Image (cartoon, rainbow, N blue to C red):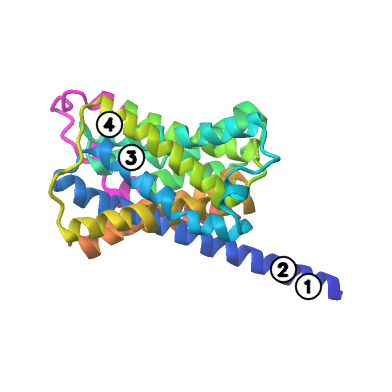
Amino acid sequence: MALSVAGEATGTHGRTGFAITILASTFLMGSSFVSGKILLDQGFDPLMLVGWRFLLAALATLPLVFMQEGSWHASLFPRHLNARQALVIATIGLTQTTAVMSLLFLAMRTVSASTAAILLFTNPVWVAVGNRLFFGQPLKANRLLGLVTGLIGVALAVGADFAGADLSKAPQPGAWIGLTLALGAAVSWAAATLIIKRNPVSVGTWTLSFWQLFIGALGALACALLAGEHWPEHISMQQWGWFAWLAIPASTGSFGLWFVALKRADATSTSGWLFLAPMFAVLLSWAVLDIQLSVWQCLGGLLVAASIWLMNR
């Protein structure tokens, strides 16, 4: 009986810790949309912003890497790391950072940020589908219902442009290209999630986060240079503040906590919580950018909560 009670207490503590971790991660993810939107509206080139954002985020993880082992070299270049594991880490960086964020910002040239956000956070659908197609993991009815409910909730909460568009008018030129790119970002994120879960690497959480951010930053900067983008010559203190928030809490913090969450639960359940990120983006937009919330957005929030309950029941 004592062992049973102890085990139950440990399980409750573990679930509470997971919930706190995933809530913090998705909150920080949501805040990145607000800070990124502010900087983009003020003239920052998107791919260059992504590259420098994640390069600073990678450097910000180094003190945490040091705390893991007491030595940067031992943590960043562990002796037991083989070529296959190094390739997995590089693939995660190129998919979860370079591909996801580059495709997302390219998509927002022809579709609105809200539409791109909705499509990006269809990621849990592709994780579930990938698990079913490639690994034979059954997709239970409650999870399928939760995914559909969550997608509807995100669409209502964020307010997709296409949902309320005048269907008698032709879509904006290039809109379908933007939609395809945004869906590509979602699929890339799902691929990275499945790679992490199916190919575990024997490195610390912050070591993995550093290499993912660093490799992803180099990839994004390479794309920015090829696109002819430039870093602004004059940046105000307020802009530096938004950039620092975007790079460190909204990038280092959110991705590091995301890896911690992935180690505590299966990929489908963890990805289901991503529906909270656009909800946090909406609430922060209301608080910071003074964007008013509608009845439909409130209804979307209730559907998001229902989807999380269904997927993790």
Does any portion of residue 201 appear in the rendered image?
yes
Contact check, label 1 and label 4, Cβ < 8 Å: no
The amino acid pointed to by label 2 is Thr
Residue at point 14%, 57% (across, down): 236
Sequence order check, earlier mark of 1 and 4: 1
Q: Secondary structure at mark 4?
A: helix
Q: Is residue 254 magenta?
A: no
Q: Secondary structure at mark 1?
A: helix
Which residue matches tag 1? Answer: 6
What's the mark number on residue 224? 4
- The region drawn magenta spans 154-179
Circle 1 Cα neighbour tier, 10 Å, few/some/many (<14 / 14–19 / ≥20): few
Residue farthest to the right?
1
Contact check, label 2 and label 3, Cβ < 8 Å: no
In this picture, residue 96 sits left or right of residue 2:
left
Report the Cα–Cα distance between label 2 and label 4. Answer: 47 Å
Which residue matches tag 3? Answer: 51
Sequence order check, earlier mark of 2 and 3: 2
The amino acid pointed to by label 3 is Gly
Q: Quadrant of residue 45?
A: top left
Sequence order check, earlier mark of 2 and 4: 2
Depth check, front residue: 208 or 143: 208
Measured as percent of width and height from the top left, residue 292 is found at 19, 60
Which residue matches tag 2? Answer: 10
In the image, residue 243 sits, relative to residue 127, either above or below, namely: below
Report the Cα–Cα distance between label 2 and label 3. Answer: 41 Å
3 or 1: mark nearer the eye = 3
Report the Cα–Cα distance between label 1 and label 4. Answer: 53 Å
In this picture, residue 130 sits left or right of residue 57:
right
